[in-house]
Amino acid sequence: MTFVEESPERLVMDVVWPRPGHRAAEHVHPSQEERWTVLEGRAAFAIGGVEHEAGPGETVVAPAGVRHLAWNPTDAPVRLRVELAPALRWRSFVERLFAGEDPVALLAEFADEVRRP
């Protein structure tokens, strides 16, 4: 994950999903819109229970408050640009999660950013 742009209004990240079929847990951003633009490969999404696939140049949006998850449905890596608006404390959440902190404790601390549905 590479942080591309950060302001109070928006956080932009470039990410690679190398593992086929790997899915993050379904979640909700109570007050953030999440937007994915596929740069390379194909990505799959379930937003509000509706599944979508997107290829290079296509954008998929999960509005604030809508449950969603995303994954790599292929055998090849997927490169995406991910935007969250507003940024809130999402960068801190992601950095701490990938550093190995307890996900349950982080969910409690970052309830304004992310919740389980």
Image (spheres, grey):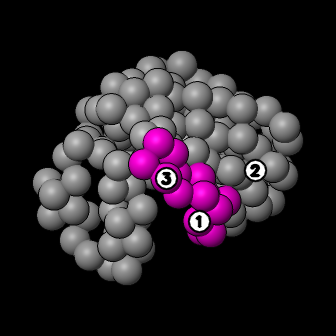
Report the residue at 33% width, 73% height from top.
Answer: 96
Q: Which residue is mark 3?
A: 7
Could you tell which of marks 3 and 2 lies nearer the N-terminus? 3
**Could you tell me which residue is drawn at 22 percent across and 53 percent down?**
110
Where is residue 90, by image quadrant? bottom left
The numbered mark at residue 24 is: none
Q: Which residues are magenta?
A: 1-15
Is 44 placed above or below 110 here? Answer: above
Q: Secondary structure at mark 1?
A: strand
Going by the numbered disc 1, the residue's amino acid type is: Phe
Are the residues flagged by discs 2 and 1 in contact, CB closer than 8 Å? no
Q: Name the quarter where the N terminus is drawn.
A: bottom right
In the depicted structure, whether residue 9 falls above or below residue 99: above
Q: Which mark is residue 74?
A: 2
Q: Nearer the viewer, residue 105 or 34?
A: 34
- Could you say whether the residue bearing mark 2 is in a helix, strand or loop? loop
For label 1, the residue is 3
> Crowdedness of circle 2 by 10 Å Cα count: few (<14), some, many (20+)?
some
Report if residue 34 is visible in the image. yes
Q: CA distance from mark 3 to mark 1?
A: 11 Å
Is residue 56 depicted above or below 81 in this figure? above
The picture places residue 89, in percent across and down from the top left corner, at 33, 56
